[in-house]
Amino acid sequence: MTDPNSPPASLSEDVKIPESISGLEPVRSVRSPIKLVYDFVPSPPVQEYLRSYSKKKILGHRSPVDGAVFVPPRGVDPRHGVLIEESVELSDRGHVGNFCVTHLPIPGRDDLDIPYVSAWIHLDGANVGFLGLVAGCENDEVHIGMRVQAVWKKEEELGNTAENILYWKPTGEPSVPVEKAGNRAWDQPNE
Amino acid sequence: MNESHNFRDVAVVSVASHQTKTLSEVNEVQLMADLISKCRNSAGVTQEEIGFTCSGSSDFLAGQAFSFVHTLDSVGAFPPISESHVEMDGAFALYEAWVKLQIGEVDTALVYSYGKPSAGSIIDVLATQLDPYYVSPLWPDCFSLAALQARLLLDKGLISLEKMAEISKRSQKNGFDNPNAVRSSKDVSIENLMNEPTIVDPLRVSDISEITDGGCAVILATGDKAKSLCERPAWIKGIDHRVDSHTLGVRDLTRSSSAFLAAEKAGGNIDRLDVAEIHGMTSAQELILEKEFCLTEETQINPSGGCLASDTMMASGLIRISEVARRIISGQADRGLAHATSGPCLQQNLVCVLEGE
């Protein structure tokens, strides 16, 4: 058996570089650009979800197992691996489940002043949160349980996209108690 | 496999698969939710009773980072489950599950894999698996590499164009009874096949695998558990995988020594084989594999039609195992060999030998 820690004889000698390239700078890195193109076709529930945005509606999916409502709808209850057929229209109001104040700009979003607040918005009637931007108040006023409402684009600018919601603004309603806000309410019935 | 190692008896007890030209709007989660529940229902188990879940898929194919996490939505991973994933064909995920079952902590495993190549360009995706310095930047497509391999075989007189056409004919005829086969024909003739135009010389249309979308789910169980879930489990008598060099230039491409070795270690040749499902991208590759596995006329080869009839990247290998297992479970066959491959020109190979009681 050869010693695995020592190189084979052929490699232990000095490497001889041909005269013709001996003066060249050694190659230290290689660039291999890769570009792959995909045609993404949204599944029917996602298509329905995106189209409903143009009518200023937010759709969720109701689980056939226990009635839990998911947003965005994906056609499946991920806890049970069961297909979902039933859509539900959700309110464009809800509360902040969790939030984060970000001091780094997003490439391509020059319109976004930093620091900005992103939050898990828990819509009334939904059992999970989804991501949104909170504005229309001072950043240090944002808190867990704060009631918010969608601020939509102008009618003529609406498209089949979640970008129709510019941001979520405070409604001024009494806040949801912290212990009942966001996922903390998972163990409590959604009535 | 050496009996003295005291391996636990592991069997395939339930299978489900689906392949189609293009899934279009149906996404991977919806496809797998359907297949996984079919597979669990036919074994009569719920996800809570599954000890280990392992999947195989490719982010490059899906065009999405951590795409397998999305697909876990189709399993029902709550309360939290014991789970793993390989960026490989599902047959290799099945190997991981088999090892997990050997450890002895769990008695059941769910294995699944899927691919939706219709969303992108599979030949570009497969080019990225090659040597990143010397080969990948040339973007050679997988069929051209397989064509070079076929050309070598032809030039050495190891195969003939007629032999290749016979393989294509077998595939299309066998595929006729398989709802998952996309390219199939009851009365295809050698003459018609020989007259097909060449796509990548020397490969004609029917010499190249039919790329499809789809997925497969399999449930494994040990010993008495397997017997309680299935009347006639397909016992895994041997499973092994081996790999050849990544560098195409240092390999003898007219052979697949890793396939030979995997079959030998899995005990493929120690008894007669009723059925063999082999995973090749071209008719020429099927001819290499038949030789490496020493298959004879007493073995029915690719009764499903194989990959020339329907080839789903990331799932084709697991589907080979499910096709053999299905025939053993139903009593159509007693002993069979299933093969899965990965990498260019049959580089990495897995062989699984299954047997009924």
Image (cartoon, helix red, strand yellow):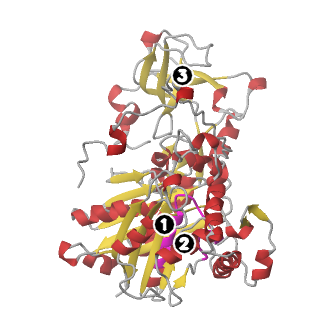
**Segment tinted magenta in the rendering:** B305-324
User: Residue A49: image x %, image y %?
Assistant: 64, 41
Are circles 3 and 1 on residues that touch, CB within 8 Å?
no
Q: Is residue B152 above or below residue B145?
A: below
Going by the image, does B32 lie left or right of A189?
right
Mark 1, residues whose alpha carbon is within 10 Å: few (<14), some, or many (≥20)?
many
For the point 54% across and 65% down, which residue is it? B316
User: Residue B301: image x %, image y %?
Assistant: 55, 81
Q: Which mark is residue A24?
A: 3
Mark 2, residues whose alpha carbon is within 10 Å: few (<14), some, or many (≥20)?
many
User: Which amino acid type corresponds to the residue marked 3 in the rendered image?
Assistant: Leu
For the point 43% across and 56% down, which residue is it? B55
Q: Is residue B309 magenta?
A: yes
> How far, Cα to Cα, is label 3 from label 1?
40 Å
Residue ID for mark 2: B288
Quadrant in which residue B152 is drawn: bottom right
What is the chain letter for disc 3? A
Which of label 3 and label 2 is nearer to you? 3
For the point 73% across and 79% down, which residue is it? B185
Q: Nearer the viewer, residue B116 or B44?
A: B116
The answer to whether residue B98 is seen in the rendering is yes
